Image (cartoon, rainbow, N blue to C red):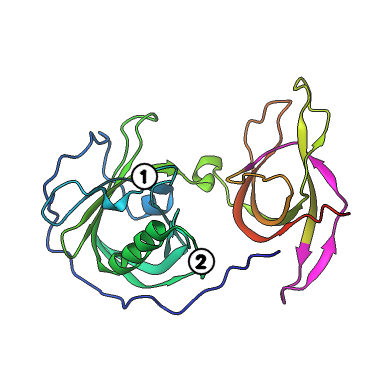
């Protein structure tokens, strides 16, 4: 069984709005960082996770958060596009900044169906408000322990506050190499230094031509590292698009590369009859 990512037509029309001066919008914010203000480059240097939201009237608004194990909304800015993650689908839109003004274009989305009606309702709500973004502000941490904060205000007065975590490119200080790995359904026991009873992922490299046709499939190998952002489910094979980063100052017993999941290209449940 395979799951494909497909882009649909724009969900909502874009709105380009001029900033008229930053306002707090009321509400009691969590303590913020004490560092300097960030520039536009700081938007792309971090993954931004929603920490607090405020209504147009200034009251704290929990409707942007779901109960249970659902992760908060996360924004990523890259290649002049903003992506919204941790919904049912991935929403994205082009964006630009002019000073403290944030212009977000109309959105597109993948077309995955979810059984969680609350998550789908939140997704639709995010798709409606995102193109009405008006102003942004980043406050950097004064120390390495302080997370930076992004504040986004929308035309109706809604306000988001998001905490930042460095992107892999910021963390590792270099651009990644993109590779494709197929991960087998089951792990296998392997020798991994002092780690007893270690279970390695089984992977093989896949290469594609510019036309998307597979041109190479490598042999199965033990994979002694882990893939950041990937949670393996026994019995399910996956083809993954991976960003591989060269690590600096690597310990003698560690991998010289860091592997970060970019996207799951396809998935299939193993045939247990074999």
The residue wearing badge 1 is: 67
- Relative placement, left or right, of 80 versus 51 is right
Residue 58: image x %, image y %?
Answer: 12, 50
Q: At 48% from the left edge and 77% from the top edge, which residue is drawn?
A: 8
Q: Is residue 80 visible?
A: no
Residue 238: say if magenta.
no
Is 39 in front, or is 257?
A: 257
Q: At 30% from the left edge and 52% from the top edge, which residue is drawn?
A: 64
| 100 up-or-down from 29: above or below | below
| 30 up-or-down from 89: above or below | above
Q: At 14% from the left edge and 44% from the top edge, which residue is drawn?
A: 27
- Residue 113 shows which numbered tag? 2
Q: At 12% from the left edge and 53% from the top edge, which residue is drawn?
A: 23
* Residue ranking furthest to the top: 194
| 214 up-or-down from 224: above or below | below
Residue 163: image x %, image y %?
Answer: 34, 42
Quarter of the picture containing the N terminus is bottom right
Residue 189: image x %, image y %?
Answer: 82, 32
Residue 6: image x %, image y %?
Answer: 56, 72
The magenta stretch is 207-227
């Amino acid at each position: 069984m395979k799951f494909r990512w497909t882009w649909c037509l724009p969900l909502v029309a874009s709105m380009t709005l001029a900033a008229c001066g930053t306002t707090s919008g009321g509400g009691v914010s969590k303590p913020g960082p004490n560092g300097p203000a960030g520039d536009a480059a700081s938007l792309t240097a971090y993954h931004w996770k929603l920490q607090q939201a405020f209504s147009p009237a200034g009251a704290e608004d929990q409707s942007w958060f779901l109960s249970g194990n659902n992760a908060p909304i996360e924004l990523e800015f890259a290649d002049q596009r903003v992506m919204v993650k941790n919904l049912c689908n991935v929403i994205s839109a082009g964006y630009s900044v002019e000073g403290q003004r944030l212009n977000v274009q109309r959105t597109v989305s993948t077309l995955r169906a979810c059984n969680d009606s609350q998550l789908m309702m939140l997704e639709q709500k995010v798709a409606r408000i995102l193109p009405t973004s008006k102003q942004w502000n980043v406050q950097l941490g004064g120390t390495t322990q302080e997370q930076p904060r992004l504040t986004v205000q929308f035309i109706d007065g809604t306000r988001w506050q998001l905490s930042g975590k460095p992107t892999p490119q910021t963390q590792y200080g270099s651009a990644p190499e993109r590779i494709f790995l197929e991960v087998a359904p089951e792990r296998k026991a392997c020798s991994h230094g002092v780690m007893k009873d270690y279970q390695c992922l089984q992977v093989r490299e896949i290469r594609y031509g510019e036309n998307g046709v597979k041109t190479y499939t490598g042999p199965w190998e033990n994979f002694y590292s882990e893939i950041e952002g990937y949670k393996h489910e026994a019995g399910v094979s996956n083809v993954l698009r991976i960003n591989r980063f060269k690590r600096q100052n690597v310990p003698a017993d560690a991998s010289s590369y860091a592997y970060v999941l970019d996207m799951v290209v396809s998935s299939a449940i193993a045939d247990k009859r074999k």
